[in-house]
Image (cartoon, helix red, strand yellow):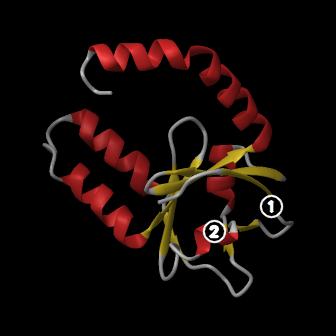
Amino acid sequence: MFLGEYQHVLDAKGRLSLPVKYRAEMTGKLVVAKGLGECLYVYSAEEYRAFIRRLMEQDDFDPRFRQVRRFFTSGAIETELDSAGRISLPANLREHARLEKEVAVIGNGNRIELWDAARWAAYNGETAERIEDVARELAELGIL
């Protein structure tokens, strides 16, 4: 499980070092995909396959499912950590998340999220201001 928040720097070649705590769970193939909210999602290949399998179980005649599936698969790449614990992020994915230098590496349960550090700070601040209302609404729906 991925928990916590770390600050890292994207190098000139588009490589990003993952936190040591995350590397043990990110052995073998990894998948980096566009995420919601202008970030990137990093999954183990196994976790990504399970995610895509759930999307593919949905009706292909429903344009919403086709859109979501295309969003998460069209720019995705399969990669591995290099010997220094880094992943290479291609330009199209860096552009999606607006990653330039300072990167917030966020644990989100079954995946890692990569955010531009300033955008993460703004998003996290907005979320903190309304989290009680959101939690109350989800509790009323029986989700929490």
Residue 127 in the image, given as x and y percentages of width and height: 60, 23
Q: Nearer the viewer, residue 70 or 137?
A: 137
Residue 7 in the image, given as x and y percentages of width and height: 78, 53
Q: Nearer the viewer, residue 122 or 34?
A: 122
Q: Residue at x 56, y 35 (%)?
A: 37
Disc 2: CA contacts within 10 A as few (<14), some (14-19) or many (>=20): few
Q: Residue at x 84, y 53 (%)?
A: 101
Residue 83 in the image, given as x and y percentages of width and height: 70, 87
**Whether residue 1 can be seen here:** yes
Q: Which residue is mark 1?
A: 10
Q: Amino acid at mark 2?
A: Lys
Q: Earlier in the sequence, mark 2 or mark 1?
A: 1
Q: Residue at x 73, y 27 (%)?
A: 122
Q: Classify 144 as above or below 66.
A: above
Residue 41 in the image, given as x and y percentages of width and height: 52, 53
Residue 21 shows which numbered tag? 2
Numbered disc 2: secondary structure: helix
Q: Residue at x 68, y 72 (%)?
A: 20
Q: Nearer the viewer, residue 132 or 15?
A: 132
Image quarter of residue 116: top right
Q: Amino acid at mark 1?
A: Leu
Q: Classify 83 as above or below 66.
A: below
- Tally the numbered discs: 2
Most distant residue in the bottom direction: 83
Whether the residues at callouts 2 and 1 have beta carbons within 8 Å, the answer is no
- Residue 129 vs residue 100: left or right? left
Q: Classify 82 as above or below 74.
A: below
Disc 1: CA contacts within 10 A as few (<14), some (14-19) or many (>=20): many
Give the position of the C terminus as an image quadrant: top left
